[in-house]
């Protein structure tokens, strides 16, 4: 064993030497970039040096007014990009607040431009990234030329700018400037949760549950789902198709008119927040900084990876605005498709249950089932069911006094007249009533009104309220009915109530889907 150790020792020594040399090499490269200086050194603080030149008095005054000069109290090297009084006086309107602009001109590290060749991004004290270009004997901070290089001081260095350099707003800041309504929606998506990594247990409650010294973390669900629009990145970008406040107001007015509502204010905020704005976000947030040519195909993937239709002729390319973390465009003609507020709402039967394992299913929490216990099953039915699966409910003793009802909700429905459609297998049978918001509905399969339906009757042709005829195909058929008791915006509760055994010996139902859509009788 001694011989083996001795043979390994030179290898270990060699590896250690290589690691040390690598670290020294990397440190040397970093030091040369950040700290190597071949220029004049003066034994004076940076602010004191700037104060000796009246051309910088406006810049120093802004530092003082916003208490940013306290940054020099910290033991670190600072680099300032200083506009002269003349440059500051010639400035137009800033994209952002003055404090954001002044922080953009400060980096909390030593930058030696002489060692930058070509282009390099640096992060400023306000977290935004600026671009330094040094080539052909000229250096620029963004588009502002650097006309004078100050000496190395005790706490840093400065460069004089001959032009305006100001930070671009990020996508969130741009939305805040142009569309306060959309900003309010994004802000409303803040959510807090108990961060167990930052919380510490301090005991137990009487039920034995752990009590934590709570530390909450806040995340924005919009940024989690789409893109962190309020953050700054070196390379990561997104493109957003946006709308002006005026365009949104006009679109909402059109929706109110289509729905027969007296005014825009009658459109529930819940619908705007839960349906409209998520829909517009799905249609309008994309990865990368997209150019007009990227929209040319008319169908592209959004940031969630879903394909969406985008009319390239309906984008105002003149509205293009470069942001620090992406780009925005506005629509030319901002119209919300009526399918968004009058569209077909579909509930797949198999989505009413959840898989528990070992071929066992349970009703989802939002599905209310009463009566005798039943064991629901989601069955794979490829090629025949709408979504290739169905919900199967069979009653163990079909000819007894079985009691059963199943209720579920369809959310965000406007008041109006609707068509409610069921697609089921024609067996097993069973006589059911259909209730909407607690009211039993009339059903007419083509031979008179009734308050109930035997699923076995779907083996025969069924007349729809649209005047078409449903026919059995591959063991499935449909029936529909007119719903006229939805008078308020909100959730609509659909109930399937078992009344008595049907014509077939086996009772229960196999549900493909239920749909609810706005209906206008012609």
Image (spheres, grey):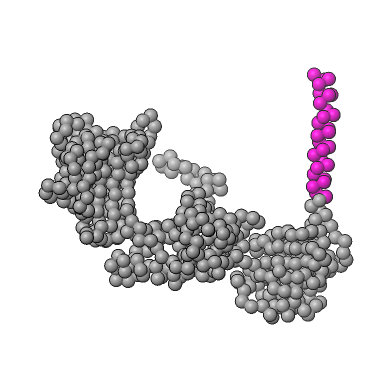
Is 42 magenta? The answer is no
Q: Is residue 89 above or below residue 82?
A: below
Q: Is residue 501 above or below residue 159?
A: above
Q: Can residue 242 be spotted in the picture?
A: no
Q: Is residue 250 above or below residue 471?
A: below
Picture coordinates of residue 323, whole percent (x, y):
60, 64
Camera-nearest residue between 362 and 237: 237
Q: Residue at x 74, y 60 (%)?
A: 119
Q: Is residue 520 left or right of residue 211?
A: left
Q: Residue at x 33, y 42 (%)?
A: 386
Q: Is residue 408 left or right of residue 313?
A: left
Picture coordinates of residue 437, whole percent (x, y):
23, 53
Picture coordinates of residue 301, whole percent (x, y):
50, 52
Occupied quadrant, residue 138: bottom right
Q: Is residue 279 left or right of residue 487?
A: right
Q: Residue at x 29, y 54 (%)?
A: 517
Is 12 magenta? The answer is yes
Occupied quadrant, residue 459: top left
User: What residue occupies the far left of the structure in this picture?
Assistant: 448
User: Magenta stretch: dominant SS?
Assistant: helix
């Amino acid at each position: 064993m001694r011989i083996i150790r001795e043979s390994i020792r030179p290898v270990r020594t060699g590896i250690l030497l290589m690691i040390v040399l690598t670290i020294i090499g990397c440190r040397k490269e970093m030091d040369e970039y950040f700290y190597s200086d071949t220029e004049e050194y003066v034994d004076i603080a940076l602010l004191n040096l700037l104060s000796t030149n009246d051309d910088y008095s406006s810049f120093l005054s802004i530092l003082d007014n916003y208490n940013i000069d306290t940054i020099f109290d910290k033991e670190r090297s600072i680099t300032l990009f200083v506009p002269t009084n003349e440059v500051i006086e010639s400035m137009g309107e800033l994209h952002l607040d003055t404090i954001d602009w002044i922080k953009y001109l400060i980096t909390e590290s030593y930058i030696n431009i002489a060692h930058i060749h070509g282009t390099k991004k640096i992060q400023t004290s306000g977290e935004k990234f600026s671009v330094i270009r040094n080539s052909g004997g000229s250096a620029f901070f963004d588009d502002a030329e650097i006309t004078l290089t100050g000496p190395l001081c005790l706490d840093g260095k400065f460069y004089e700018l001959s032009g305006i350099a100001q930070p671009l707003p990020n996508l969130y800041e741009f939305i805040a400037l142009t569309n306060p309504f959309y900003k309010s929606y994004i802000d409303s998506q803040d959510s807090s949760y108990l961060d167990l990594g930052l919380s510490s247990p301090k005991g137990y409650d009487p039920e034995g549950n752990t009590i934590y010294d709570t530390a909450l973390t806040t995340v924005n669900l919009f940024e989690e789902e789409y893109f962190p629009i309020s953050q700054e990145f070196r390379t990561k970008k997104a493109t957003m198709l946006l709308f002006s406040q005026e365009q949104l107001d006009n679109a909402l007015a059109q929706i109110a008119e289509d729905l027969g509502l007296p005014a825009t204010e009658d459109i529930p905020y819940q619908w705007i927040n839960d349906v409209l704005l998520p829909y517009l976000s799905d249609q309008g947030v994309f990865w990368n900084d997209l150019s007009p040519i990227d929209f040319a195909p008319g169908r592209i993937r959004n940031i969630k990876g879903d394909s969406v239709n985008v009319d390239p002729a309906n984008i105002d390319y003149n509205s293009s605005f470069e942001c620090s973390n992406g780009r925005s465009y506005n629509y030319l003609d901002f119209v919300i498709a009526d399918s968004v507020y009058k569209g077909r709402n579909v509930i797949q039967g198999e989505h009413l249950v959840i898989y528990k394992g070992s071929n066992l299913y349970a009703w989802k929490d939002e599905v209310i089932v009463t009566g005798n216990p039943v064991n629901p099953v989601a069955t794979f039915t490829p090629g025949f069911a709408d979504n290739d699966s169905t919900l199967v409910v069979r009653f163990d003793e079909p000819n007894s006094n079985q009691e059963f009802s199943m209720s579920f909700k369809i959310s965000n429905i406007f008041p109006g007249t609707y068509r409610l459609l069921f697609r089921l297998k024609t067996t097993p049978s069973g006589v059911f009533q259909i209730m909407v918001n607690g009211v039993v509905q009339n059903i007419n399969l083509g031979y008179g009104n009734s308050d109930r339906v035997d699923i076995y009757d779907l083996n025969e042709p069924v007349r729809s309220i649209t005047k078409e005829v449903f026919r059995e195909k591959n063991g499935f058929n449909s029936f529909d009915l007119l719903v006229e008791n939805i008078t308020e915006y909100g959730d609509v509760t659909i109930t399937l109530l078992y009344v008595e055994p049907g014509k077939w010996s086996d009772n229960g139902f196999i549900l493909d889907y239920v749909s609810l859509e706005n209906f206008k009788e012609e």
